[in-house]
Amino acid sequence: MSKPIMAIVGRPNVGKSTFFNRLVGERRAIVEDIPGVTRDRIYAEAEWQGKEFGIIDTGGIEVRTDDIILSQMRDQAVMAMDMADVILFMVDGKEGLTTADREVATMLRRTGKEVILVVNKVDKPSNEWDAVMDFYELGVGEPIAISAANMLNMGDLLDRIVAGFPEDCWERDEERTSIAIIGKPNVGKSSLVNALTKQNRVIVSPIAGTTRDTIDTPFEYEGNAYTLIDTAGLRKKSKVHDSIEKFSVIRAVAAIERCDICILMIDAVEGLTEQDKKIAGYAHEAGKGLMVVVNKWDLIEKETNTMRDYERKIKAELLFASYAPVLFVSVLNKQRIFDIIAKAAKIAENREQRITTGKLNSILEDAIMMRQPPSDKGRRLKIYYGTQVNVKPPLFSFSINDRELMHFSYARYLENKIREAYDFEGTSVKFIWNERRGKDNV
């Protein structure tokens, strides 16, 4: 389902990050020991009353400042406001109303967005009225008093947040596959959208950063319905611009969260970069479909095995996502661009594929016979049975005697055996290891 987004803004030191951490602190996520996979904590997800939504934390806003770092933090917050469905404006109840709060409120009124005014650091219910009274002057609605540190009134605030999202924000046409096109600036993302739809739906410019926000474009091909999500470019610059460049990654992460399949587009001349690897890690961790599209292939001088060698190099650098197919295109010349959609359709099919319990256990028996499970201090790993418990991505649950005996290399071996038997190209495969208590564990 599509998830709405809430941005937390306010001047420095009012408790935004404490509030953010409280909301997302109980969230349980799959953690993998893969470099570049851990999510940046500036973006996370929360759930309340069955409603899931994204949260963006921002640095403090200093409206009037010549400090370049503080200016970048302010710009980051402005981009968060542009992106959000609801803006949570946090102020400090202990310090009271300040000139900086008034200046931030002026910025927020210009956005036209739903704004929720939150007075933080109100640690006692008896102090609520005194803490919030002055903040009515800001003219952005009725203040809500909370204590993020003590979780005071958090339930009431979450009710207000969920009610503030657009009514249709969780609705989505389940028959439509959404495809996020991600990558650095000027690799051809917007040009690809225009070429596929045969319309100038997205502004195309040689100036880096022309696409400022994510843009959704409905699209149909060979009887299937898609939504193409064009995203702002991902780039890495000097330390001065780190906050803005960091936020461009957050935009892409938010797009990844609401898509089914990611197209990581790279420039054939430049090749795969560290930033590309990082964003591929986000897609892998989120369990989305993934393919790598090498654009501007027409600019590469070809030899006999140029394409094969290029693909091998990419897969070697994306070992954690070696299942991702690599396609070579020229968007400018419209070469092989519809192969991308055909491959996306196949990946969507693979993500919904199910293996019966009988066939899965037959694969396990053969795999174990060919290579014995690992052992430690005289105890050997035992795999009793496995079953597929979910799709999109395919999720398998295995009953074993001891999780500590399941080495990651053996898990990768089992994954490879499953992939040899079934076509899971373009999608990650997730495993759950459940210990079975009994005499085998004594």
Image: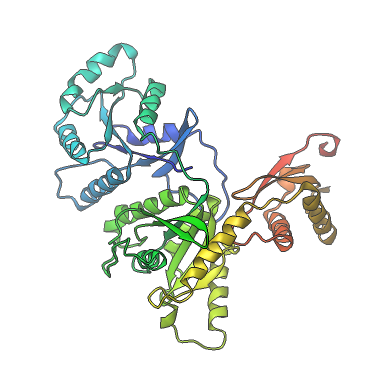
Identity of the residue drawn at 46% across and 43% down? 172
Q: Position of residue 237 (x, y in %)?
A: 31, 63
Whether 364 is drawn above or below 437: the answer is below
Q: Position of residue 35 (x, y in %)?
A: 52, 57
Whether 2 is drawn above or below 149: the answer is below
Does 140 sit left or right of 355 as displayed? left
| Number of marks in picture | 0
**Residue 377 versus residue 211: which sits nearer the camera?**
211
Identity of the residue drawn at 70% across and 52% down? 407
**Residue 416 versus residue 294: which sits nearer the camera?**
294
Does 241 sit left or right of 298 as displayed? left
Residue occupying the far bottom of the picture: 303
Looking at the rendered image, the quarter that the C terminus falls into is top right
Does 21 sit left or right of 85 as displayed? right
Identity of the residue drawn at 32% across and 61% down? 202
| Rendered image quadrant of residue 158 | top left
**Residue 161 versus residue 329: which sits nearer the camera?**
329
Q: Position of residue 129 (x, y in %)?
A: 25, 14
Whether 224 is drawn above or below 330: the answer is above
- The answer to whether residue 30 is seen in the rendering is yes
| Rendered image quadrant of residue 87 | top left
